[in-house]
Amino acid sequence: MNVVASDLNEMERFYRANLINSVTGYKSLHLMGTQDKAGISNLAVFSQVIHLGADPALVGILFRPRIPGMNSYENILETGHFTLNHILPEMSCQAHWTSAKWSSSEFKEVGLTEEYLHGFPAPFVKESVVKIGLHMVAEYPVSINNTCLMVGAIEYLEIPDDAIKQDGFVDLLETRTVAGFGLDGYFADGNYDRYSYAKPGVRPTLI
Amino acid sequence: MNVVASDLNEMERFYRANLINSVTGYKSLHLMGTQDKAGISNLAVFSQVIHLGADPALVGILFRPRIPGMNSYENILETGHFTLNHILPEMSCQAHWTSAKWSSSEFKEVGLTEEYLHGFPAPFVKESVVKIGLHMVAEYPVSINNTCLMVGAIEYLEIPDDAIKQDGFVDLLETRTVAGFGLDGYFADGNYDRYSYAKPGVRPTLI
């Protein structure tokens, strides 16, 4: 299929949504845990999470237009804190399910367990093996399509020791982390390669 | 491993870079093709690519601090156009290799082929099977760590017909698209599941 901009404009809406959501490739998938001021928890699957920098350790999250009932976003503005939790293959269905318009906490509704660790003021997912606690440090409007890039600083990390290589690299097959593609694809298992530090004239080797 | 913010500050720099680059999960990996005003091409592997929206079809790319010699960024400012090309497993080593500090075009240096299609003013990678042509429509500074989010509008798409499902979903196993993790991990092959539209009270099913 060869498509130019005018073809995109004419596509059926859901077809285009699937196509454009797929074509940027694999996505980082996380379950985001938040709570409101009254302590009511929320859990939502997020695919628009991006590494911003390692020093300081910052993560970006793209939020959709601010529609009423977008609880994760509102909760973070209220409390300043949120968690990102990796998804195991056996949690994919539950993770996807959090995207339904629930009227009470998604933890209970989809059958995942809220966990509060070391006084961190947002709920983690007990079943996840990689857990990240963040506080919001900035928000940048992306005016072109009325989205925004929220920036979180990493305050807490939990990763199984077995999955961390000597140089700090986390083996996402060891943690059994699920990736996303498209709007509804959850990807698990497979193989990967790592290569040596890249230099001109020296073909990188497997490490 | 349990880590709090103060532990992160004390970590050895490369260890922290590997850890923090890994912990956000799978990354979308692309080869970005550009050229300068004089027509000299550049090819660079990018992992900080994010879906911004499907209508209009927008992609975000996070650029690192503006250091001299960051050719992709400078080329886009000069010409307004760039391409994103999916990486096949047999191209992973070459893709990684583009990140070396080459003094001439990475296409030639790593052994990938420049391709110009339908008059689009930036080079595609001939060996890639999924090719995206974009023009820059906006740039937002992310002042907290001196990065910026550049926004590209999709102008051209090439995807093998076999890989596109009836509803527009692109099967990234069919296209053999490589994902990234950490700073140097390239991931290929495996399995995935898709789930039905999520509704309260109805457990999503495999589709």
Image: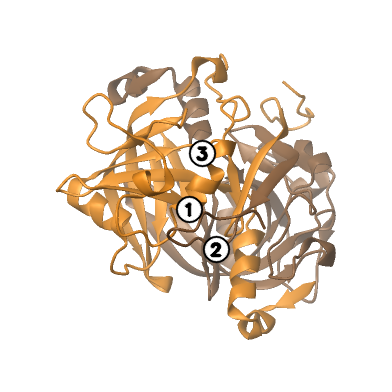
Chain colours: A orange, B brown
In three-dimensional space, the C-alpha distance between marks 1 and 2, rounded to whole angstroms, equals 9 Å
Which residue in the protein does label 2 denote? B197
B185 with respect to A77 (left or right):
right
Residue type pointed to by label 2 = Tyr
Q: Which residue is drawn at 75% across and 65% down?
A: B165
Q: Is residue B92 something one can see in this rendering?
A: yes
Q: Are the residues under badges 1 and 3 in a single subunit? A: yes
Residue type pointed to by label 1 = Trp
Q: Regarding mark 1 in the picture, which secondary structure is present there?
A: helix
- Chain for disc number 2: B
A199 with respect to A141 (left or right):
right
Which residue in the protein does label 3 denote? A87
- Chain for disc number 1: A
B143 with respect to B122 (left or right):
left
- For discs 2 and 3, the disc positioned in front in the rendered view: 2
In three-dimensional space, the C-alpha distance between marks 2 and 3, rounded to whole angstroms, equals 19 Å
Locate the N terminus of chain A by quadrant: bottom right
Residue type pointed to by label 3 = Ile
- For discs 1 and 3, the disc positioned in front in the rendered view: 1
